């Protein structure tokens, strides 16, 4: 009898009884995953991952669940619950189609549309393979993600994290990890070196020089590993920065403080590499074609002895980065020209004199392309230079946001019946009135905001917004008024959309 006979046996089991794997390498280890929305938000944090997941949702909704690849689970003996080792995305997709109200706001309307296309009872149970233990799943997980392209593969860092977890679990037993991953010793050592280089970014000296948003990117799996690999595998970089490799060990022969300062600058430029105004463009192409120039623009790494008695090769120091270079300060300045150290710990969203109507630290998660595009553009357009564009966009943004919310909460058909007309023929004023009367609780922020919007005597009214698009007047378009209008609407947007500060 084969030790893998369990893989040939399929058992019919309710999806509701299956739990998602919280240690799945697809997930950001820094995030908490308590409910379905937490898992989904993490899995679709990148555009490519979101597109792939939405494609999976649509496929199941239109064609049904196709069990072409086994869903592999194991039973946790500590709580007798079944956890999904392989097939988490598929199980999560089915769970959402059965319970669309549990989806994050950013994709809830889309999930609702797809859920209406399928009989939810049909996907209540699926056939699974029950492994005797998680260890029995490991070889299959590795083979599944190392060679198959049928389903969404792990990213490079996710694959590397999987190897690191095996490395820790089996106490650095290279032979055991080789038997599971089918990688040779050299490949494993290379992967572990890259992971340790990446983890240098978690040193307090580096983190203290980053903004909150930059820190979140560093702690998650959204740092482009290919760029870090290309940079640190360069002989010129290793020589100038004092980096040596010995099997899976990395040694830093330069001054640790100086090395980490330069690394912090590198991380900042990598994170902001796609922004149009970033001074130093660091990507795989420029590292190859313009390495000497990049090294010259980054802080120089010193080889003088450290001033402390700590081991020079240690990356666990906890000193604050007081000596961060002027280059880093200059390139992390906000629109007012103040350096990062001059910025408050939390941006003042209600500052009436800010130059953009939406502060850059706010993020919106939505499947509506136009809504997402307008949101991003409003974070870039300077006031008052583009005040009329911003004013008109604010009206359009509200219209699309309300429409998406109506679809998400499932009252589109009821609204059509109530007004006896097609949805696209119902004016925004009537849509707001319907939500106020039927969906928003009296005296809540959303109710009060809509009530004021519908009162034409208020400055912050729907009439004012309509005038931005259809009228000829130019009043109410100064910077302070437009910023105030956004701040007035924000609690409503926060309630009906997945919008928050990071």
Image (cartoon, rainbow, N blue to C red):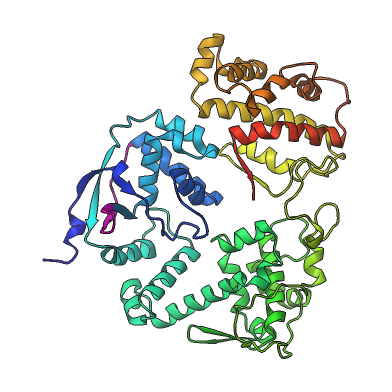
Along the horizontal axis of the image, is 155 left or right of 143? right
Residue range in magenta is: 64-81
Residue at x-position 86% and y-position 56% = 337
Residue at x-position 28% and y-position 46% = 67
Res. 66 visible in picture? no
- Decide: is 471 above or below 482: above
- Decide: is 222 above or below 445: below
* Residue that sits furthest to the left in the current view: 1
Instruction: Out of 135 and 377, give the one closest to the viewer.
Output: 135
Position in image of residue 179 (x %, y %): 31, 76
Instruction: Out of 284 and 415, give the one closest to the viewer.
Output: 415
Position in image of residue 368 (x %, y %): 58, 36
Looking at the rendered structure, the number of numbered marks drawn on it comes to: 0
- Decide: is 92 above or below 443: below
Placement of the N terminus among the 4 image quadrants: bottom left
Along the horizontal axis of the image, is 232 left or right of 262? left
Residue 271 falls in image quadrant: bottom right
Res. 227 visible in picture? yes
Along the horizontal axis of the image, is 345 left or right of 494? right
Position in image of residue 146 (x %, y %): 38, 65
Query: Does the segment drawn in magenta span residue 77?
Result: yes
Position in image of residue 10 (x %, y %): 19, 50
Residue 145 falls in image quadrant: bottom left
* Residue that sits furthest to the top in the current view: 420
- Give the main secondary structure of the magenta stretch: loop
Residue 351 falls in image quadrant: top right
Residue at x-position 54% and y-position 16% = 415
Query: Does the segment drawn in magenta span residue 423?
Result: no
């Amino acid at each position: 009898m084969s030790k893998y006979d369990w893989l040939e046996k399929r058992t019919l089991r309710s999806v509701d009884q299956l739990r998602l794997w919280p240690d799945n390498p697809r997930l950001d280890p820094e995030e908490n995953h308590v409910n379905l929305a937490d898992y989904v938000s993490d899995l679709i944090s990148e555009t490519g991952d979101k597109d792939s997941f939405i494609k999976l949702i649509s496929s199941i909704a239109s064609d049904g669940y196709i069990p072409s690849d086994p869903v592999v689970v194991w039973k946790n003996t500590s709580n007798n619950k079944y956890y999904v080792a392989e097939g988490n995305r598929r199980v999560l997709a089915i769970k959402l189609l059965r319970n669309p109200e549990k989806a994050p706001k950013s994709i809830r309307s889309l999930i609702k549309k797809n859920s209406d296309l399928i009989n939810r009872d049909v996907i209540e149970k699926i056939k699974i393979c029950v492994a005797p233990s998680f260890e029995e799943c490991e070889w299959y997980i590795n083979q599944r993600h190392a060679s198959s392209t049928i389903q969404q593969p792990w990213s490079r860092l996710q694959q590397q994290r999987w190897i690191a977890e095996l490395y820790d679990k089996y106490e650095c037993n290279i032979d055991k990890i080789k038997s599971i991953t089918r990688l040779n010793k050299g490949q494993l050592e290379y992967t572990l070196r890259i992971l340790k280089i990446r983890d240098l970014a978690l040193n307090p000296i580096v983190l203290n020089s980053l903004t909150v948003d930059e820190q979140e990117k560093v702690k998650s799996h959204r740092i482009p590993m290919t760029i870090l690999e290309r940079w640190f595998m360069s002989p010129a970089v290793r020589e100038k920065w004092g980096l040596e490799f010995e099997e899976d060990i990395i040694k830093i022969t330069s001054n640790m403080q100086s090395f980490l300062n330069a690394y912090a600058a590198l991380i900042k430029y990598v994170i902001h590499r796609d922004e149009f105004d970033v001074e130093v463009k660091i990507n795989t192409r420029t590292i190859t074609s313009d390495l000497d120039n990049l090294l010259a623009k980054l802080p120089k790494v010193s080889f003088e002895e450290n001033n402390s008695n700590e081991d020079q090769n240690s990356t666990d120091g906890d000193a604050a980065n007081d000596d961060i270079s002027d280059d880093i300060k200059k390139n992390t300045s906000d629109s007012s020209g103040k350096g990062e150290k001059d910025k408050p710990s939390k941006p003042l969203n209600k500052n009436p004199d800010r130059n953009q109507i939406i502060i850059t630290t706010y993020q919106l998660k939505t499947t509506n392309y136009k809504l997402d595009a307008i949101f991003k553009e409003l974070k870039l357009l300077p006031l008052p230079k583009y005040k009329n564009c911003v004013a008109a966009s604010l009206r359009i943004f509200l219209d699309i946001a309300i429409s998406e919310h109506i679809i998400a909460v499932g009252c589109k058909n009821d609204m059509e019946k109530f007004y006896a007309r097609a949805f696209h023929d119902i004016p925004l004023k009537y849509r707001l009135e319907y939500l106020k009367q039927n969906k928003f609780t009296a005296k809540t922020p959303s109710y009060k905001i809509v009530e004021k919007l519908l009162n034409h005597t208020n400055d912050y009214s729907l009439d004012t917004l309509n005038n931005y698009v259809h009228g000829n007047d130019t009043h109410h378009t100064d910077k302070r008024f437009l910023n105030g209008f956004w701040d007035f609407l924000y609690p409503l947007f926060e309630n009906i959309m997945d919008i928050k500060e990071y």
